[in-house]
Amino acid sequence: MTRLMQNPCLLPPVATFSIIGFDPATQTWGIAVQSKFLAVGALVPWAKAGVGAIATQSWANTAYGPQGLALLEEGLHPAEVVERLTQDDEHRDLRQFAVMDRHGNTAAYTGKRCFQWAGHVNGQNFSCQGNILVSEATVTAMAESFQHSAGSLAERLLRALRAAQEAGGDSRGKQSAALYVVREGAGYGGYNDRYIDLRVDDHPDPIAELERLYGLHQLYFGKPDNAIALDLTGDVRAQVREALRALGFLGTGGEDRTLPEALNRFVQMENLEERWRGEEAIDIEVFRYLKDRAERAGR
């Protein structure tokens, strides 16, 4: 083992702010994080549906992730997990991490040698933590946002991250961000629990980019609302026809009888199959996306 690996003081600190959240109604666990650090999403967030979540940062000990989840799966309380993970870690005073169990119980740890400002605010169903921050206001704003917001867990986590940044954020600046959300059977095709796994590894405004990626995620994988599908008639049909023609999916003659086929081809090309509503209707998000694509193509 190299000296660099043995001594975390020779490694760049994973200085960051993060939030762990739990939605008991949907049995969903998630983590959102931002940092002046390359690809923070590869290090900080760890979660498993039905077990809990862990965020590890500040000279992050990434072993805390899998080891902590294993301890939670054995039935240990988050406070016990914190004690077990730190007891034999000679560099524990440099660590910062938070643990949440399957019930939303939390415990957090900020080592006394973490760079200031460093600290955490945690309670039932959430834990907010950060180090090398402008001030304590960052974690306070994050916690208040999460506690007083509505919507899906992912949306609340993103809002909390935005509130934290607006309150000061990482004193060194911005570079990367991530959103990781798990729910039983919510992964692609229902084969795993990885519902959302979005990472912005290097960007001048990583939270804004993460929000953009989340919007795309919901477009491609969000559950469509059949109640607001649009009938493919009248003005809607005319606008769809015009947009498809502008994008080259329709010719100039006899297009009405092939419009549903052309729309279906567009939906498949854009990976929007989950939003296909048959030949007599169009999902409202597909309608908006189609018009936007046509408008941008005409510029």
Image: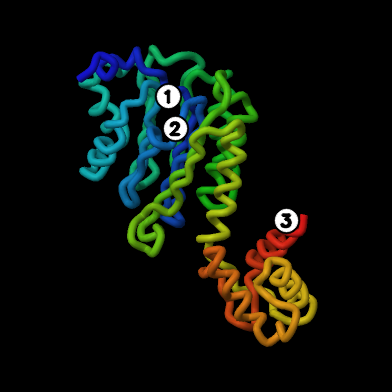
Q: From what the image shows, is residue 31 above or below residue 60?
A: below
Farthest right residue in view: 235
At which x and y percent is residue 79? 31, 31
Q: Quadrant of residue 233?
A: bottom right
At which x and y percent is residue 89? 24, 20
Q: Are marks 1 and 3 in contact (CB under 8 Å)?
A: no
**Which of these two is toward me, 295 or 286?**
295
**In the shown orientation, is residue 26 left or right of residue 167?**
left
**Which of these two is toward me, 147 or 199?**
199
Q: Are marks 2 and 1 in contact (CB under 8 Å)?
A: yes
**Three-letter code, disc 1:** Val
Q: Can residue 144 be spotted in the picture?
A: no
**Three-letter code, disc 2:** Val
Q: CA distance from mark 2 to mark 1?
A: 7 Å
> Crowding near pointer 3: few (<14 within 10 Å), some, many (20+)?
few
The label number, if any, that marks residue 73 in the structure image? none
Which residue is at 49% across, 14% downward?
116
**Which of these two is toward me, 299 or 58?**
299
At which x and y percent is residue 45? 39, 38
Q: Quadrant of the N terminus?
A: top left
Q: CA distance from mark 3 to mark 2?
A: 33 Å
The mark nearer the N terminus, 1 or 3, is 1
3 or 2: mark nearer the eye: 3
Q: Quadrant of the C terminus?
A: bottom right
Task: Give the secondary structure at mark 3.
Answer: helix
The label number, if any, that marks residue 40 in the structure image? 2
Q: Are marks 3 and 2 in contact (CB under 8 Å)?
A: no
Q: CA distance from mark 1 to mark 3?
A: 39 Å
Q: Which residue is mark 3?
A: 296
The label number, if any, that marks residue 14 in the structure image? 1
